[in-house]
Amino acid sequence: MCTSSRCSILLLLTLSLTTTVSEAIEARSLPEPTFASNLTTAIPFDSLPTTYPRSLEPQNPIIENQIRDTLAHYPLAIDGKNFAALDLVFTQDVVANYSEPLGVLTGLPSVISSLQSSLSPVRTQHAFSTQLIEILEGESTARSLTYYTASHFGQGDYYGQVLYAYGQYQDDWIRTCCPEEWRIKARTLVFMGPYIGNLSVFT
Ligand SMILES: *[C@@H]1O[C@H](CO)[C@@H](O)[C@H](O)[C@H]1NC(C)=O
Ligand SMILES: *[C@@H]1O[C@H](CO)[C@@H](O)[C@H](O)[C@H]1NC(C)=O
Ligand SMILES: *[C@@H]1O[C@H](CO)[C@@H](O)[C@H](O)[C@H]1NC(C)=O
């Protein structure tokens, strides 16, 4: 994040290190990533209706579709148990707060190993529903809110048993380079209700 004192130090450095004014302007115009939410802290449910604007003017539909499509690869990776494919969705330095029991996972390898081992006793289906995507100023960052229902199907002795989880993902996105793609840099998973079903499917 760029506090005003840090910005002026950066600006001074930029000005003193570059030889021409045009180079200085170019360096200054690089968009500073701004995130609407604090990385691992959830936006409270009662703030969500007013936190997300209603897009009365169309956003960039290409970017919106890139983000929606990228996020759709999350259930494909999880439910297909191709956890390595999560690198299509998250940045390498992602910080993901999965709430209890997983807690805050820092870095993609940690996300991959935690999800892989915690989900190893079950097969899953992650279904998305309500979703909002907001592309932020400069079109280099975005955030999204996505409701999900996760069904965890027991195996072996627990075949036919299921545990349902209801929640939402609050995701902060960044446009990567190069190639230009979108990745989740920060995620907070917030449960919206208790687990329903048979908890023993995880044993
Ligand atoms: C982020 O946290 C800082 C202090 O930790 C707080 O001042 C700021 O309001 C928070 N921003 C949001 C969007 O919650
Ligand atoms: C993670 O998210 C949960 C649920 O919103 C919250 O209670 C917890 O404080 C968050 N943890 C951190 C470290 O921000
Ligand atoms: C969970 O599934 C097991 C195996 O089918 C069954 O014996 C047990 O009663 C179930 N528990 C609940 C709470 O439904």
Image (cartoon, grey):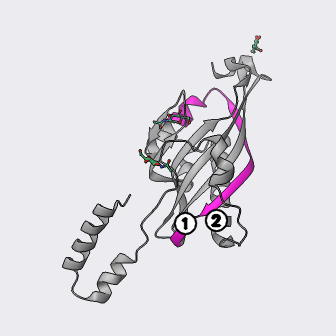
Where, quadrant-wise, is the C terminus in this rendering? top right
Name the residue: 28% across, 88% down: 21
* Helix, strand or loop under label 2: helix
Q: Is residue 119 above or below residue 26?
A: above
Q: Which percent across, then down, holds residue 119?
A: 61, 31
Amino acid on which disc 2 is placed: Gln
Q: CA distance from mark 2 to mark 1?
A: 8 Å
Q: Which percent across, then down, holds residue 159?
A: 77, 22
Residue placed most toward the observer, 40 or 5: 5
Q: Are marks 2 and 1 in contact (CB under 8 Å)?
A: yes
Give the residues drawn in magenta, as a range.
114-138
Question: In the shown orientation, is residue 118 left or right of residue 108?
Answer: right
Which residue is labeled 1 in the image?
181
Where, quadrant-wise, is the N terminus in this rendering? bottom left
Which residue is labeled 2 in the image?
66
Residue placed most toward the observer, 187 or 202: 187
Q: Which mark is residue 114?
A: none
